[in-house]
Amino acid sequence: MKKNTNPRFIAFIAGLLAAAISTAIIAIASRDVLVSVVNFVAVLCVCFLVFNYLLQEFIYNKIKLIYKSIYRFKTHDANELRALDKYDNDPIETVSNEVLDWMLENRNEIDQLKEQENYRHEFLGNVSHELKTPIQSIQGYIHTLLDGALEDKKVNRLFLTKASNSTDRLIELVEELTSISRLEGDKPPLDIELFDLVKLAEEVMEMVENQAKKKKVVVGFKKQNAKAVLVEGDKAKVRQVLVNLIVNAIKYGKNEGTVLIGFYDMDKSILTEIADNGEGIPEEHLPRLFERFYRTDKGRSRDQGGSGLGLAIVKHIIEAHKQTINVRSTVGIGSTFGFTLKKG
Ligand code: ADP
């Protein structure tokens, strides 16, 4: 049977068969050629019309209806839908193709939904876990104070200070969560401007001065008196990148260590590197370092007040600028985080 069989062709073949059989019987019975010929033509015509009508009415049109239903589900464009009536293609083949496409699309959609569901599940688990630690700590100190420590002048201030530190940590965590959900969700447009990276880095160095002093860490530029380095970017977001990377370098660097900031001209972009001489990061952690809530040493990072969101935020910001971020690290020697920005 030919590939694009249509109802008319099937009706014609069926009519031909019926006409041939009935003519053969009549020819044997009557032995009259004229009667046989008339019978053949009449049976062929009647059968063709009847079969064609039945096929069109009950099968072909119903399939076309299913096809249109599928199409209506996929498109909301009335013009496209009307144009379907004019198509002179084979609806059976089109329906099977459409159903196949539809199944593939649905499977992709289901896979995506499952992935999002897993992500939501994991995210919620991580968030509640992160929030639980400072909340439990605050609760513990308050209960101890209420149980009598409030009157004990040796510990009451200390416990209140610790509870207050945990509240600060809670606020920091919520701010980071807001930041990451904004970066991953609505993706607000960047406020691109031309600015001097050296000046911005100096501002950030001033901001983290106290933190650096506590660990006797020296934060400075690789080349002293670096001259202006102009870049194009969202200044507030780039400031956040510098804060997160420099604070990490101080936090995970060694006591009395150094944090050096360097700028390198890469033709169309500027590469900024923040290097510390801390204990470094084992190689197996490097590929997952920028994932949210990922930590190389959970206990140590939490002790440092870390949420595991800082590097994920940094990556989102740099990728929103369509630029790159990378890390190299050697255990015992230190880590260097580098990111690029469009040259101004
Ligand atoms: P956190 O809030 O825990 O610091 P980040 O996303 O900023 O989260 O960092 C993720 C993890 O990467 C940290 O917990 C730490 O284990 C590791 N890390 C980040 N920066 C450094 C660094 N400069 N030296 C060593 N380890 C680092």
Image (spheres, rainbow, N blue to C red):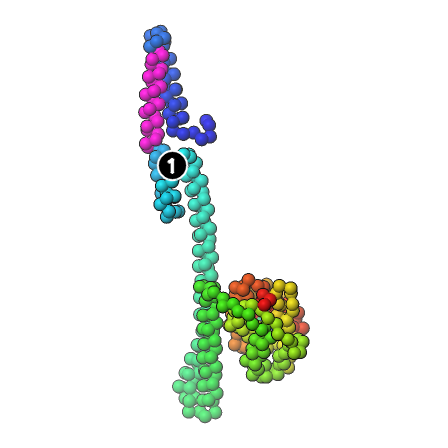
Is residue 226 located in the magenta-colored stretch of the structure?
Answer: no
Q: Mark 1 points at which residue?
A: 86
Is residue 52 located in the magenta-colored stretch of the structure?
Answer: yes
Q: Position of residue 207 (x, y in %)?
A: 54, 80
Question: Which of the pair 297/106 is nearer the observer?
Answer: 106
Q: Where is residue 305 in the image (x, y as percent from the top left)?
A: 52, 76
Residue 156 appearing in the image: yes
Question: Which of the pair 245/293 is nearer the observer?
Answer: 245
Q: Is mark 1 on a helix, strand or loop?
A: helix
How many numbered badges does the structure rendering display?
A: 1
Q: Position of residue 136 (x, y in %)?
A: 44, 77
Residue 133 appearing in the image: no
Q: Position of residue 252 (x, y in %)?
A: 59, 75
**Looking at the image, which residue sits at the far top?**
31
On screen, residue 302 above or below 120: below
Q: Which amino acid does label 1 sit on?
A: Lys
Q: Residue at x 47, y 57 (%)?
A: 115
Question: On the rendered image, what quadrant is the C terminus found in?
Answer: bottom right
Q: Magenta segment, which residues?
A: 36-58
Q: Residue at x 36, y 17 (%)?
A: 19
